[in-house]
Image (cartoon, grey):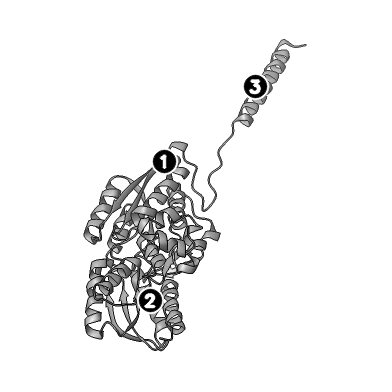
Amino acid sequence: MDTRTSVTRIGTRVLAAMLLFTAGCKSEKKETPPPAAGETAAKPAAQTTGGKIALLLPESKTSRYESHDRPNFERKVKELCADCEVIYSNADQDAAKQQNQAEAALTNGAKVLVLDPVDSASAAAIVARARQSKVPVISYDRLIVNADVDYYISFDNEKVGKLQGQALVDKLKADGKGAGTIVMINGSPTDNNAKLFKAGAHSIIDGSGLKIGAEYDTPDWSPDKAQTEMEQAITALGKGTIAGVYCANDGTAGGAIAAMKAAGVTPLPPVTGQDAELAGIQRIVAGEQFMTIYKAIKPEAETAAELAVTILRGGQPEASKINGKVNNGQKDVPSILLAPVAVTRENLKSTVIADGFWKPDEICSSSYKNACTAANLL
């Protein structure tokens, strides 16, 4: 055999072996495929597990915010994301203060804002500022109007007013006072929810046969201002002519009841409320307040926390959780709407107590023990 031919054949075999080895190495290297349309590329774990979420609540006169919304939200965030940080602020019913708190949260690195606005209209400026930083905004409990919010979590607030109005109409008809005169003490004119409560109540009360002798919108939802409004109504109408009182929440109900007790109104007429505050529940047990609206705040706060963590991680909520769209004047906002429940003395046990919202020993303090016994709560 020619020496050159032998060398050539050996070289060819070596080259073939090298090519096979190289091909084998390439086949073992796993390439990460590009993200499909509509998906985002996977991020390192350090960038997806932690982050900052701002929870901005409007006021503390309504006890639910500090006693239920905040702790349930913070607990759920920590449960879902141990490395997440909640930046919490309460605006104490000051819209300018809330705007400063939102700005501070954004400066501090908040990547999601969960905002319950003091003023539903002026909060649009907060949303616009968050948009500049590409930070999503969840409108919590109260709808932010005329703004590009991402999601809205609340209750069917017009239904709240309908439940309140229907309970009052039914009670007064049952008492033989279906044509009586009532006082309406609505919520804050700067709160979009208050407008919805009011609209829902009027849709039932108007045309029911009841007469509205006096009606007020209560700045800041203040119980003190509600008490003053009720005093004015008693002076104008006479304390013996008021068949019932529509109050938009338990705080205003407490103010109205204080005014009537001070004026010597006996017996107290049926009074509505909302939020199932402890003081409101105790007044119901004692027979001073007729009803309240129980809104399951724990699932509302937990749902907001779940949504905030999902958004923080670059995801979207399950389509099944979005059960409505609410127009805020600028867009139809994808919404999660929970169901409110009317609560009277008769169903306290099966609602707020059964859900663990309030425990019997919390309701039945020393001055309410006899009333609790009569209501079969002890």
Q: Is 32 left or right of 367, judged from the image as shown?
A: right
Secondary structure type for disc 1? loop
Q: Which residue is mark 2?
A: 270
Q: Is 171 left or right of 65, judged from the image as shown?
A: right
The Cα–Cα distance between marks 1 and 2, rounded to whole angstroms, is: 50 Å
Q: Quadrant of residue 224?
A: bottom left
Picture disc at residue 18: 3
Q: Which mark sits nearer the N-terminus, 2 or 3?
A: 3
Q: Which residue is mark 1?
A: 50
Mark 1 nearby-residue class (10 Å; few <14, some 14–19, many ≥20)? some
- What residue appears at the point 23 percent right and 54 percent down from the top-left corner? 100
Which amino acid type is marked by label 2? Pro
Image location (x, y in percent) of residue 291: 41, 70
- Vertical arrangement, residue 159 with respect to residue 180, above or below: above
Q: Which mark sits nearer the N-terminus, 3 or 1?
A: 3
Image location (x, y in percent) of residue 152: 42, 62
Q: Is residue 336 visible?
A: no
Q: Is 126 left or right of 376, judged from the image as shown?
A: left
* Disc nearest the viewer among 2 and 3: 2
**1 and 2 marks in contact (CB < 8 Å):** no
Picture disc at residue 68: none
- Vertical arrangement, residue 354 with respect to residue 272, above or below: above
